[in-house]
């Protein structure tokens, strides 16, 4: 949700739309679920940053501090 909301301007740029359409077509043609695959890959990449910056389980830690 955050990625879709925060990146709405990037996701709707004409060059991104055409590239994404081509990517989705190629993935679907090869038996993949394009939307799930792309979002899963974005989530995987974001999780690496969460790990690197110590942001895993941040909400409960912040709540304890408040």
Image (spheres, rainbow, N blue to C red):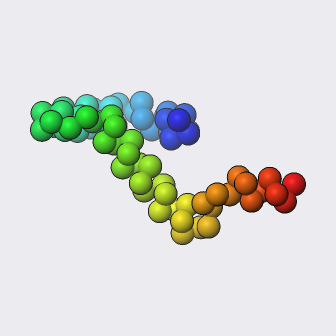
Q: Quadrant of the C terminus?
A: bottom right
Q: Position of residue 26 (x, y in %)?
A: 16, 37
Q: Is residue 2 left or right of residue 32?
A: right
Residue 36, relative to residue 63: is it above or below?
Answer: above
Q: Is residue 43 left or right of residue 26?
A: right
- Rendered location of residue 23, percent (x, y): 23, 38
Q: Residue at x 41, y 48 (%)?
A: 42
Vertical relation: 60 (above or below) 12: below
Image position of 17 (left or right of 55)? left
* Quarter of the view holding residue 51: bottom right
| Residue 14 image-quadrant placement | top left
Specify the quadrant of the image occupied by residue 34. top left
The residue located at (54%, 69%) in the rendering is 52
Q: Residue furthest right?
A: 66
Asked if residue 37 lies left or right of residue 51, the reply is: left
Outermost residue on the left side: it is 30
User: Where does the image place residue 47, in percent across and percent down from the top left?
Assistant: 49, 57
Residue 41 image position (x, y, % from top left): 36, 49
Residue 18: in sight, yes or no?
yes
> Is residue 22 in view from this perspective?
no
Reply above or below: 43 against 54: above
Identified at 74% across, 59% down, the residue is: 61
Residue name at image x 42 percent, y 56 percent: 45
Give the tally of numbered discs. 0
């Amino acid at each position: 949700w955050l990625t879709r909301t925060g990146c709405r301007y990037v996701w709707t740029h004409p060059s991104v739309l055409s590239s994404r359409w081509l990517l989705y077509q190629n993935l679907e043609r090869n038996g993949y679920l394009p939307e799930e695959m792309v979002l899963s890959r974005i989530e995987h990449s974001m999780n690496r940053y969460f790990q690197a910056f110590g942001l895993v389980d941040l909400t409960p830690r912040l709540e304890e501090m408040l």
